[in-house]
Image: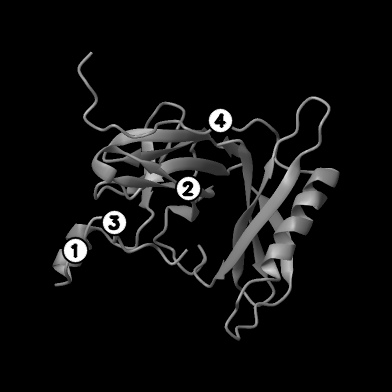
């Protein structure tokens, strides 16, 4: 086979290994997540009390397991973030819990043009040739179109990760923002027919040019509001 034209990490993370959190395990993760929510700098915004936490499939990368979460608040905002930990062995409990959280007013209900509801957070970096770096990014969410079965992450048309939907939710860990290319998230049905696609970024180059704005330089793409 010929050499790869795009030398980037593909399927770097383990696929989901467990069911969505429930019972005492969910309570443990919830305590960590809500603790991180208490540390959010709201800049004076009254978020309101958080509601039920929604969990997304786990993904493990570089020896840590990441379990993303979202929760709506009484003030109409959405909390989003993740809990990560070192998975335990056969006779060991998970340890070294860490959590991060933020909030947004940009919800799916307020954006009827969205086809996939996405959250993302950079969790590391990968160094490529000539010093170029990819932002290893945790991406989680839910399709807003019916009939989907699997979600993929694509970089310059190359599939770099994928996840089967679990109760209508997915989690990816994939390289983004590499040599001017940015990640697209796509939804497919069981037959491999594409149903929806969303970028992690607010607008692409064509939109920027049509609006009379300069396109972002490589590594400076404009991210979505969350």
Marks 2 and 1, how far apart in space?
25 Å
Circle 4 or circle 2, nearest the eye: 2
Instruction: Give the side of residue 46 with respect to residue 213, left or right.
Output: right
Question: How many residues crowd mark 2 within 10 Å: few (<14), some (14–19), many (20+)?
Answer: few
Q: CA distance from mark 3 to mark 1?
A: 11 Å
Q: Are marks 4 and 2 in contact (CB under 8 Å)?
A: no
Helix, strand or loop for disc 2: strand
Secondary structure at badge 4 equals loop
User: N-terminal of the two: label 3 or label 4?
Assistant: 4
Relative horizontal placement of residue 162, taking residue 222 as reference (left or right): right
Give how far across and how far down residue 5 sits, in percent: 21, 29
Q: Residue at x 80, y 44 (%)?
A: 25
Q: Nearer the viewer, mark 2 or mark 1?
A: 2
**Sequence order check: which comes first, mark 2 or mark 3?**
2
Q: Which residue is mark 1?
A: 215
Report the mark closest to the observer, 3 or 1. Answer: 3
Residue 175 seen anywhere in this rendered image of the structure: yes
**Who is closer to the viewer here, 173 or 92?**
92
- Above or below, 36 relative to 1: below
User: Left or right: 22 with respect to 67?
Assistant: right
Q: Which residue is mark 3?
A: 219
**Rendered position, 189 above or below 199:** above
* Mark 4 → mark 2, Cα distance in angstroms: 16 Å
| Of pointers 4 and 2, the one earlier in the residue sequence | 4
Q: Secondary structure at mark 3?
A: loop
Q: Which residue is mark 4?
A: 14
Of pointers 2 and 1, the one earlier in the residue sequence: 2
Q: CA distance from mark 3 to mark 4?
A: 27 Å
The residue carrying pointer 4 sits among few (fewer than 14), some (14 to 19) or many (20 or more) residues within 10 Å by Cα, namely some
Instruction: Please tell me which residue lies in front, 128 or 71.
Output: 128
Residue at image position (76%, 39%) is 94
Residue position marked by numbered label 2 in the rendering: 124
């Amino acid at each position: 086979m010929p050499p790869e034209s795009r030398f980037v990490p593909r399927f770097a993370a383990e696929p989901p290994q467990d069911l969505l959190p429930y019972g005492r395990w969910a309570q443990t993760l919830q305590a960590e997540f809500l603790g991180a929510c208490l540390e959010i700098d709201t800049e004076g915004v009254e978020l309101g009390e958080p509601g039920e936490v929604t969990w997304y499939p786990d993904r493990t990368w570089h020896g840590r397991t990441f379990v993303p979460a979202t929760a709506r608040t009484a003030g109409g905002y959405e909390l989003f973030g993740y809990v990560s930990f070192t998975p335990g062995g056969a006779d060991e409990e998970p340890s070294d819990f860490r959590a991060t959280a933020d909030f947004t007013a940009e919800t799916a209900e307020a954006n009827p043009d969205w086809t996939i509801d996405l959250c993302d957070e950079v969790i590391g970096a990968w160094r490529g040739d000539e010093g170029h770096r990819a932002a290893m990014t945790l991406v989680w969410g839910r399709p807003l179109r019916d009939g989907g079965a699997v979600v993929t992450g694509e970089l310059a048309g190359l599939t770099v990760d994928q996840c089967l939907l679990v109760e209508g939710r997915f989690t990816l860990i994939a390289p983004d923002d590499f040599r001017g290319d940015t990640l697209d998230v796509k939804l497919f049905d069981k037959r491999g027919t594409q149903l929806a696609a969303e970028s992690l970024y607010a607008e692409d180059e064509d939109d920027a040019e049509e609006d009379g704005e300069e396109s972002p330089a490589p590594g400076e793409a404009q991210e979505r509001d969350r």
